[in-house]
């Protein structure tokens, strides 16, 4: 690391793997940035011996070779941790920088690992809440929920893509209510966070002056260092996430045969379902003595109208302008998740179409809604990391990052799985003459829908649940 820090570069000569057999560093590539070395370190590998006989090389900032004598005695294989069972010849001095794709995949794998843990904890928590309410006639452990959701919220606001790793089950249809609570919490928190940053900046720019002509460009990159006005403070975001997580608790009081009915609901049944928010939800809040006004507002009003006379909204005795921004965000996240999820009575709709539909329904209805919608579209992106897209040339590709989107094609144009690892590519039309363009006529898929086409090196990174 010292060599790289001082402008030099290193090459291992051998491949470096982590304990799961994932290649962290290719042996024959010079590393000249610290990132790959840090990733090796994060994988529990504190040091790696170098053997120049295996094509390893150390070069200083002026391009001169450094002899092993010059860097002193290097630790032997016994100094390596977390690599039991991997042959010694695979270890070399932290080499390098490698292949961007491995680095990205390692980062994604780590994110997924954390997301899986958080998801499991959240699922256990919401399962207990619903079970306790049913068993006790309404009581549940609110403190436990607060703890779990706080942990979830911290994970969600660290980086803007985190939420997408928590919502990988949008294509599954089992245990809908558990996943729905987590999804709405994850999507809602991501949108809220984005809205908070963007809207606070708009207000601050306004306060500081400017002619207002270019006051808000929702497509500009976020510049977040907001000082001055902040729309929602961290403790408020925590309360809001809590509300998102619990928004549908009132459904525990609605009979299962009504909630899961395959056919059309009768008028009476629909009236009963509506009560889950403003009546049953409110009853459970009162019964558990939850005095958090934010949570209560979300539970009671997450189906309230967002503009004058919006159909299918309830309760109708609230004016849309009185519905807080966070409750509006809950409603949009709820609609998005319901539409993109497969249920016993309906198929999942492609997220691209859902985002478009939501935008068409709500844009131009109200100025504040426009701010929310821009945050919504920017947060969700239309290509969630970990999903599969089709390119216009016929290739299938794995989405590494919704930004771009950055994708990894893994089949040829005819759909045959590639035998080599390709480089990631940006798959949009903004790059001139780009041959890699997402085909929006075909649905975004979950990995398990095309599992047979996915090469082994990618399967390790996929969440295969259910
Ligand atoms: Fe609801
Ligand atoms: Fe809901």
Image (cartoon, rainbow, N blue to C red):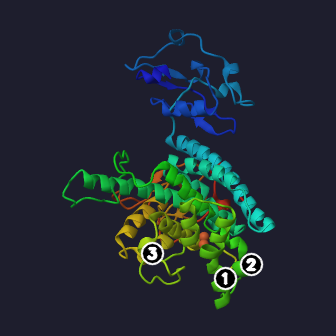
Q: Give the mark, 3 or 2, whose residue is nearer the N terminus.
A: 2
Task: Name the residue rendered at 66%, 71% in the picture.
Answer: 283
Outermost residue, bottom side: 267
Q: Report the label total.
A: 3
Residue 124 placement: quadrant: bottom right
30 and 84: which is toward the camera: 84
Q: Mark 3 points at which residue?
A: 306
The structure residue drawn at horizontal position 54% and vertical position 72%, both measured from the top left corner, is 301
- Distance (Cα) linking label 1 and label 3: 22 Å
Q: How crowded is mark 2: few (under 14 residues within 10 Å), some or many (20 or more)?
A: few
Looking at the picture, how far across and down is residue 266, in whole percent? Answer: 66, 90
Quadrant for the C terminus, please.
bottom right
> For the residue labelled by badge 1, is the local secondary structure a helix, a strand or a loop?
helix
Image x and y of residue 434, in percent = 38, 58
- The percent position of residue 125, horizontal first and vertical second, equals 71, 56
Q: Do the residues labelled 2 and 1 touch (CB within 8 Å)?
A: yes
Q: Are marks 1 and 3 in contact (CB under 8 Å)?
A: no
Is 93 placed above or below 171 here? above
Circle on res. 272:
1
Quadrant location of residue 135?
bottom right
Residue, disc 2 = 255
> In the image shown, does 333 or 140 lie closer to the viewer?
140
Marks 2/1: CA–CA distance: 9 Å
């Amino acid at each position: 690391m010292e060599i790289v820090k001082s402008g030099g570069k290193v090459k291992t000569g051998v491949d470096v793997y982590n304990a799961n057999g994932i290649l962290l560093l290719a042996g024959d590539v010079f590393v000249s940035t610290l990132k790959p070395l840090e990733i090796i370190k994060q994988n529990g590998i504190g040091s790696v011996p170098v053997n120049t006989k295996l094509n390893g090389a150390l070069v200083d900032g002026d391009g001169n070779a450094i002899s092993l004598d010059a860097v002193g005695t290097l630790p032997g294989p016994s100094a390596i941790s977390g690599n039991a069972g991997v042959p010694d010849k695979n270890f070399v001095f932290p080499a390098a920088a490698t292949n961007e794709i491995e680095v990205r995949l390692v980062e994604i794998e780590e994110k997924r690992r954390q997301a899986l843990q958080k998801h499991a904890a959240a699922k256990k928590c919401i399962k207990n809440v619903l079970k306790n309410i049913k068993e006790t006639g309404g009581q549940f452990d609110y403190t436990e929920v607060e703890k779990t959701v706080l942990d979830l919220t911290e994970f969600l606001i660290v980086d803007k893509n985190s939420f997408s790793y928590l919502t990988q089950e949008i294509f599954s249809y089992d245990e809908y209510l558990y996943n729905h609570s987590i999804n709405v919490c994850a999507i809602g928190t991501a949108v809220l966070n984005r809205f908070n940053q963007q809207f606070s900046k708009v207000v601050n720019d306004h306060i500081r002056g400017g002619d207002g002509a270019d006051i808000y460009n929702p497509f500009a990159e976020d510049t977040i260092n907001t000082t001055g006005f902040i729309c929602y403070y961290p403790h408020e975001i925590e309360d809001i996430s809590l509300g998102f997580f619990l928004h549908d608790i009132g459904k525990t009081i609605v009979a299962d045969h009504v909630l899961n009915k395959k056919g059309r609901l009768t008028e009476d049944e629909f009236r009963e379902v509506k009560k889950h928010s403003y009546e049953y939800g409110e009853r459970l809040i009162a019964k558990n003595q939850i005095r958090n006004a934010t949570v209560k507002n979300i539970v009671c009003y997450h189906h309230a109208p967002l503009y004058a006379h919006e159909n299918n909204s309830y309760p109708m005795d609230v004016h849309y302008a009185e519905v807080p921004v966070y409750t509006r965000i809950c409603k949009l996240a709820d609609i998005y998740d319901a539409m993109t999820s497969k249920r016993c009575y309906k198929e999942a709709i492609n997220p691209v179409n859902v985002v478009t539909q939501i935008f068409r329904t709500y844009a131009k209805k109200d100025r504040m809604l426009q701010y929310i919608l821009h945050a919504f579209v920017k947060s969700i992106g239309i290509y969630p990391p970990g999903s599969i897209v089709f390119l216009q040339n016929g290739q299938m590709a794995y989405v590494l990052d919704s930004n771009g989107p950055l994708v990894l094609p893994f089949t040829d144009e005819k759909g045959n799985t590639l035998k080599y690892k390709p480089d990631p590519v940006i798959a949009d039309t903004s790059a001139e003459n780009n041959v890699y363009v997402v085909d929006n006529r075909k649905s975004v898929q979950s990995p398990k829908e095309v599992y047979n086409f996915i090469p082994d090196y990618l399967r390790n990174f996929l969440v295969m649940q259910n």
